Each structure stands twice: as C-alpha cells, then as structure tokens.
Amino acid sequence: MEVVLLQLGGDVVDRDERLKRVDGLLAREGENADLIVLPELWTYGAPDFSRCKERGEPVPGETSVWLSERARELSSYLVGGSLIERDGESYYNTSLLFDRHGELIGKYRKSHLLSYHSQERSVLSVGEDRPTFPTPLARLGIAICYDLRFPEVFSAMAAAGAEVFVIP
C-alpha cells in the first residue's frame, strides 16, 4: 500500500492559499498513492477555536466537495485530515474518508477534545461513535490528535475489525 502523508506549516492561514499548497503537494506526491492523509484542521493554519462558528461548514460543503474532487482526480482513498463540521447548532472536529471515485464513505468526529491551553472543548461537541471503514486496502479506523492518548479508542476500533489506524 502506497501511503502519502501531507504536512503543512502554520505560516499561512488564508484558506485559499492553503488549498493551493495542498494542490501543489498532491500534484507532486499523490499520483500513485493508494491512500492520502491530510493533517488535522489543515485549511485553518493554526487552530483558532474562537472562530469555529464562522469557519464551520456542513458536510457536504465547500471543503468536502474539494476533497472529493481530489480523491477522484488522483484515484486514491483520501482521509481529509479534519475540518470544523457544522451540523445544526453543533460543531465537530470531523475527519472525512473518500474512496477512489470521490464518494464520501466515512466520517469520524473527534471524541476527546483538548481543554489544556485550548478552547476546543468549550466550542466543539464530542463525537460519540468509533466507526471503522472497510476499503479494499484494509479496514480503517480514524482518530484525531488527542484521541491518541486514549487506548480505549483503539481497542474499540480493533474489536470492530480495524486493521490500520489513521490519525491526522
């Protein structure tokens, strides 16, 4: 399995400029990838949770459509890092999984929100599910950032058959 992991610096916080940077990286690195993984909250630069309500977007929405197009163009499975998802009055730190055709086949909402030196817990809602996602590559389990510190997240996904863990 050919996996491409992308990382962006925090020097540019303009969303459109960050999209252009990722496009350039994908053009250079993503051509033969089976799986592409973007970082947590990559469209925002440094996370500023005080702006969640203005930056949050529905799924499907502008960013998820952009991610879908890239997965289809590259014929790769794509874990879209994470974005601030607006669902009604609630906001989540959400990771999306797209198949080679650009279809959204999975969604994971971060279940352990950071509170130390972060506003994340005060503005975002907790994801309740720990789904796994069957793909021809492997059954994937997705966790985001601070979830990594909680072994029960991975125990639950392993019990549900996860073979590969992806942590944007």
Image (tube, rainbow, N blue to C red):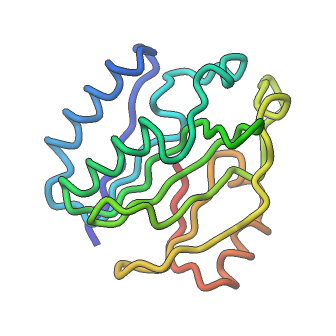
Instruction: Residue 144: give x, y in percent of width and height.
Output: 62, 50
Name above or below for residue 32 compared with residue 59.
below
Name above or below for residue 89 compared with residue 131.
above
Judge from the rendering whether residue 77 lies leftward or rightward of residue 83; answer left or right: left
Comparing 105 with 23, the one in front is 105
**Residue in view at x 57 percent, y 59 percent:** 107
Kindly indicate the quadrant of the structure image that contains residue 78. bottom left
Instruction: Residue 103: give x, y in percent of width and height.
Output: 37, 63
Judge from the rendering whether residue 125 lies leftward or rightward of residue 21; answer left or right: right
Judge from the rendering whether residue 49 lies leftward or rightward of residue 139; answer left or right: right
**Residue in view at x 43 percent, y 44 percent:** 64
Instruction: Residue 153: give x, y in percent of width and height.
Output: 74, 66
**Residue in view at x 46 percent, y 67 percent:** 105
Judge from the rendering whether residue 15 lies leftward or rightward of residue 1; answer left or right: right
**Residue in view at x 48 percent, y 47 percent:** 60
Comparing 84 with 147, the one in front is 84
Instruction: Residue 163: give x, y in percent of width and height.
Output: 52, 80
Comparing 68 with 33, the one in front is 68
